Image: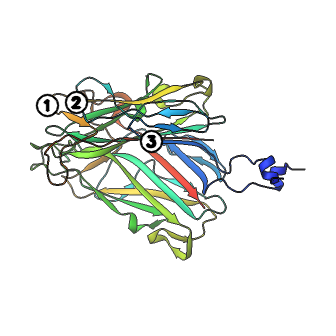
Amino acid sequence: MGSLTTLYPAPASNNILEMLSGVADGRTVTVSSGTYTFQNVTAGHSLSTSYSDLPGSAITYTPPEGAKYVLYKFSYKSNSASLNYGSSGIHHTKLFIDGTDVYRAHKSVAGNYSGSHSNNHANFTSFTEYVFDLTATSDDLGQGKLNGWTTGKLIKCQGRDYSSPYYQADIHKNDWEDGTGASGEEVYTKPTIKIIAYK
Amino acid sequence: MGNLTEIFPAPASNNVLEVICGIGDGRTVHGNENSYTMGTAAAIELTTSYQDIQGSAIDYILPADTNYVHYEYVVKWAATDTSGICHWRLYFDGNDVSAAYINNASSHGSSNHGHHLVYINWVFDLTVSSTNYSQGQIAKSDWTGAKTLKVRSREYSSSYDARAHWMTWWNGSSSGYPFLTSPLLTVTAYS
């Protein structure tokens, strides 16, 4: 016989069904909807003028039963590339779900152009954040709207440079540390993912 | 007579055990079992030595059954001159979580226009069997009682000065600056 609380479950105390977050260090996290393994980022990632997956952004997620909204946030370090002096490091990011480009989440990120292609100082924390709406009457993945979500779907981000050889960017990378060039573990910052499922 | 579910309450309906969230204005935030007082931030100049960044510190006590602690700190950064290159480190109980290190700056230039938010976040993994501070992996046996989580920062050099919690311009003017932007600290414990 189950416990009384199984037979007579209490109403949910709030509308959050589940939170899943982690650093891209290869960890495995188990929550109510399943067990998830985060990617393991061990270096910076240089963008090119073709889109490539942003390491650490991918997760195949299945929301818990009753979820109406799923927030996905991928936090990462953006860095103007030292190669050819990335200058403002203009780059573009996309969010994908199940292979479909969520165009509402398109983003372009850059520092300010300093008047010459002579430095790569522009670097800052950045993120891609989106709320998937699971209450739609039909799927419109391009807008992140779904008519339910009951099986694992791959969420990930991609990025590219604006152009070459200038305006190039690195992801996750740090060029400086404590008044000199970065070294050791500090040459890159591991990104994080946070997912919250709401009802 | 109350409902059965009041007499025999169910476990938490989700895996979020506690969220502590507050602005760095000295407020006290009450959690499920403990209260936390946020630091009080002022617009400050950074130096070439690391200093504690106000509003980032919390002496956090784990709720029972915590497996993960997500630490999130949003702080306003401003260049004083050129690009304002700045370094940010996260500490657990006095130990540097070097995997969370972040360097930030604006583009190089002759102005001090570079102003943006810096987001320092890390998910401490408490499911590990042994502690690795540099990777933010903390065995539960090493997180008993209150442990201090905080951020420290410095500028790259005196040629690239930077500021924290600082606004130079507001409503079309810089008269009366610096203006304060208070930081935001959020700590989420979940199982």
Residue B191, percent across and down? 63, 41
State which chain disc 1 sits on: B
In the structure shown, which secondary structural element does the residue marked by tag 1 occupy? Answer: loop
Q: Label 3 to label 1, Cα distance in Å?
A: 34 Å
User: Which circle's residue, 3 or 2, is located before the other in the chain?
Assistant: 3
Decide: marks 1, 2 in contact (CB < 8 A)? yes
Tell me if residue B82 comes above or below residue A12 in the rendering.
above
Q: Nearer the viewer, residue A136 or B177?
A: B177
Q: Specify the farthest residue to the front.
A: B1
Q: Quadrant of residue B47?
A: top left
Q: Label 3 to label 2, Cα distance in Å?
A: 29 Å
Q: Is residue A41 visible?
A: no
Tell me if residue B84 comes above or below residue B174 in the rendering.
above
State which chain disc 3 sits on: B
Instruction: Name the kind of residue labelled 1 in the image.
Output: Ser
State which chain disc 2 sits on: B
State whether discs 3 and 1 lie on one chain.
yes
State whether discs 1 and 2 lie on one chain.
yes
Tell me if residue A16 comes above or below residue B53 in the rendering.
below
In the structure shown, which secondary structural element does the residue marked by tag 3 occupy? Answer: strand
Residue where numbered disc 1 is placed? B159
Tell me if residue A124 comes above or below residue A151 in the rendering.
above
Q: Nearer the viewer, residue B62 or B35?
A: B35
Residue where numbered disc 2 is placed? B156
Within 10 Å of disc 2 (Cα), the crowding (few <14, some 14-19, many 20+) is many
Instruction: Name the kind of residue labelled 3 in the image.
Output: Gly
Side (left or right) of B173 relative to A32: left
Instruction: Name the kind of residue labelled 2 in the image.
Output: Tyr
Residue A29, percent across and down? 60, 43
Residue where numbered disc 3 is placed? B22
- The residue drawn where x is 48% and y is 68% is A144
Decide: marks 3, 2 in contact (CB < 8 A)? no
